[in-house]
């Protein structure tokens, strides 16, 4: 029997860290290949996939500003770094014959299309994977906020937040606290009130106000993206008030 997906259109948020190998920085081609395979699996289920990539594996604006750089300049550097990750992922997907388009919020026509909402939707309808690069195009924001914004714009039914080495939302860092408790379900208000480090507050508020559910899960186990779109009980689901 053909497996059927729970969602028609998703935004997959990949943090920069998820693209780095064991060394924790840079781009690991093996990881790109594995993620590309996982994305291909859900494209084959008929799911329309938009990807938002981060850049923590290369550069974060906050780090730059802590080193004394102008915050906006450091943030623009972060946005440019997401373009490198987007191109690496595009390359990985195209090696598997998955059609893709990269759309950048900062114009750079030689390497990517500019972000045009209607065009992105058209690509998705044609079952092309659309990779959103350069964040929102504005400093002081994050790629989590980008995922929330783009999900609202393209009317995605869910944000799939793939985490590295963490399989959901916990009441404390499970890598530090041994008996940390994993939540299966949470509300955005819980995240905001308890300051849980799932997403920043701008991203959480945007998701809450626009009623976009978020599924937080681990990308470390191959096959999890497919499980997520099939509606299997993995990770933590965040929704509502
Ligand atoms: N960034 C930004 N505006 C945006 C999105 C990202 O200025 O709309 C910058 C910001 O400096 C951020 C960096 O790009 O630190 C990388 O994004 P992020 O930290 O969200 O990446 P992730 O944590 O997902 O790897």
Image (cartoon, rainbow, N blue to C red):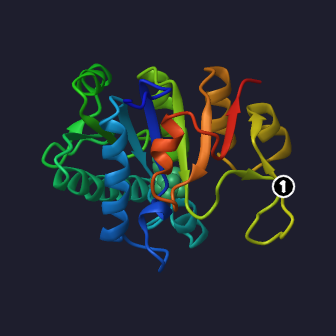
Residue 133 in view: no
Which quadrant of the structure image shows residue 204?
top right
Compared to 186, does 173 lie above or below?
below
Q: Position of residue 72 (x, y in %)?
A: 48, 53
Residue at 35% x, 33% y is 45
View extreme (left): residue: 110
View extreme (bottom): residue: 23
Residue 43 in view: yes
Q: Position of residue 195 (x, y in %)?
A: 80, 47
View extreme (front): residue: 1
Q: In the depicted view, which residue is nearer to us: 192 or 92?
A: 92
Q: Position of residue 193 (x, y in %)?
A: 84, 39
Q: Is residue 113 left or right of residue 155?
A: left
Provide the secondary structure element on which disc 1 rests: loop
Compared to 143, does 163 lie above or below?
below
Quarter of the picture holding the C terminus:
top right
Residue at 64% x, 60% y is 166
Q: Is residue 191 left or right of residue 160?
A: right
Quarter of the picture holding the N terminus:
top left
Q: Mark 1, residues whose alpha carbon is within 10 Å: few (<14), some, or many (≥20)?
A: some
Residue at 22% x, 41% y is 100
**Residue holding disc 1:** 181
Which quadrant of the structure image shows residue 116?
top left
Q: Is mark 1 within 8 Å of ligand 1?
A: no
């Amino acid at each position: 029997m053909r497996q059927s997906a729970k969602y028609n259109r998703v935004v997959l948020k990949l943090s920069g860290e998820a693209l780095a190998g064991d060394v924790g920085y840079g781009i690991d081609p093996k990881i790109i290949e594995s993620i590309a395979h996982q994305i291909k699996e859900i494209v084959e289920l008929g799911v329309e996939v938009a990807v938002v990539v981060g850049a923590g594996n290369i550069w974060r604006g906050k780090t730059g500003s802590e080193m004394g750089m102008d915050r906006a300049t450091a943030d623009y550097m972060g946005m440019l770094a997401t373009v490198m990750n987007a191109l690496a992922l595009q390359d990985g997907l195209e090696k598997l014959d998955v059609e893709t388009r990269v759309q950048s919020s900062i114009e750079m026509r030689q390497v990517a299309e500019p972000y045009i909402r209607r065009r992105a939707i058209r690509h998705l309808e044609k079952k092309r994977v659309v990779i959103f690069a350069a964040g929102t195009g504005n400093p002081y924001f994050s790629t989590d906020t980008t995922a929330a914004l783009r999900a609202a714009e393209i009317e995605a039914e869910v944000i799939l937040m793939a985490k590295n080495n963490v399989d959901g939302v916990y009441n404390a860092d499970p890598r530090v606290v041994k008996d940390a408790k994993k939540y299966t379900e949470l509300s955005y208000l819980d995240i905001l009130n308890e300051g849980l480090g799932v997403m920043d507050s701008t991203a959480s508020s945007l998701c809450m106000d626009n009623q976009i559910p978020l599924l937080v899960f681990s990308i470390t186990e191959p096959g999890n993206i497919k499980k997520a779109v099939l509606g299997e009980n993995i990770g933590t689901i965040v929704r509502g008030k």
